[in-house]
Amino acid sequence: MTEPRTRVLFLGSHLRSFHCLRYLLTQVPQAQLVGIVPHFSNTGVREDQRVEALAATHGVPYLTYEDIAGLDYDLGISLLFDRKLPPAIVDAPPRGFVNIHMAPLPRFRGANGVMHALLKARQDGVWTFGVTLHYIDHELDTGPIIDLIEFPIFEDDTASTLHARASDRVFELFVRNIHTLIETKGRVPAQTQEGHAYFFRRADVDHHIDLNSTPDEIYDKVRALTFTGRPKPFVEIGKYRFYLSLEP
């Protein structure tokens, strides 16, 4: 008798979400997608990289966030989704809800992990970054860790370059774990988070550069705030404001 497929709810419509979803739909036949829920914010992807098109092509329901409450599924997957899930959703699937977090856990919980990693690397003597696959629990980014891919932070990294390298590892992390997640009847082995943790909110960003800081502190803050398309760090001299960047 054929084993029943694992019913999956997928959250996310970022470009990395799109790539992982396409792999799930085309390379993991044991998975049955019960629905796809997009990001709340505009992800800015091209028309041919939108999860709506994938959903339509594969006959998967394209849902709103409000539709989740009435669904019956085995496993939830959050792929860079931009909303903290309430306990009622987290606890619904018997195999749990997993998430890919764009920072190493438990070191950087919350938002803007790339920026804070560059700000803290020299201070803490920790010159590594990473992306984490973990189970979601009732708090933010505190659930057990399934897998972590780490890589170095370079002295000349900016937020843009480190974010690009982290983004490139999301698909790798997804592919090397998704088959086990789908084929395992219960939850896969995961490690309770231990060790020092920073937690940052999206609002915890200060673009002002204090010229009384050391040269290393100034350099690290400028590169931590150098991100293509985002506001630049600045110094104020008298009534003038000067914007700084390490972009070419």
Image: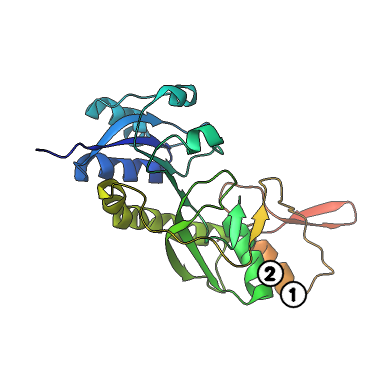
Residue placed most toward the observer, 15 or 150: 150
Which sits in the foreground, 27 or 187?
187
Q: Position of residue 109 (x, y in %)?
A: 60, 55
Mark 1 and mark 2 in contact? Answer it, CB < 8 Å.
yes
Residue 246 visible from this viewpoint: no
Figure quadrant of residue 83? top right
Q: Which residue is mark 1?
A: 215
Circle number at residue 4: none
Q: Amino acid at mark 1?
A: Pro
Residue 219: mark = 2
The secondary structure type at the circle numbered 2 is: helix
Q: Secondary structure at mark 1?
A: helix
Q: Residue at x 31, y 50 (%)?
A: 181
Question: Can you name the residue that lies furthest to the right here?
Answer: 238
Q: Is residue 30 visible?
A: yes
Mark 1–mark 2 distance (CA, rounded to whole Å): 6 Å
In front of the other: 221 or 245: 221
Q: Residue at x 32, y 41 (%)?
A: 21
Q: Quadrant of the C terminus?
A: bottom right
Q: Amino acid at mark 2?
A: Tyr
Q: Is residue 111 left or right of residue 10?
A: right
Q: Give the left or right position of residue 24, taking residue 192 as reference.
A: left
Quarter of the image for residue 5 reads top left
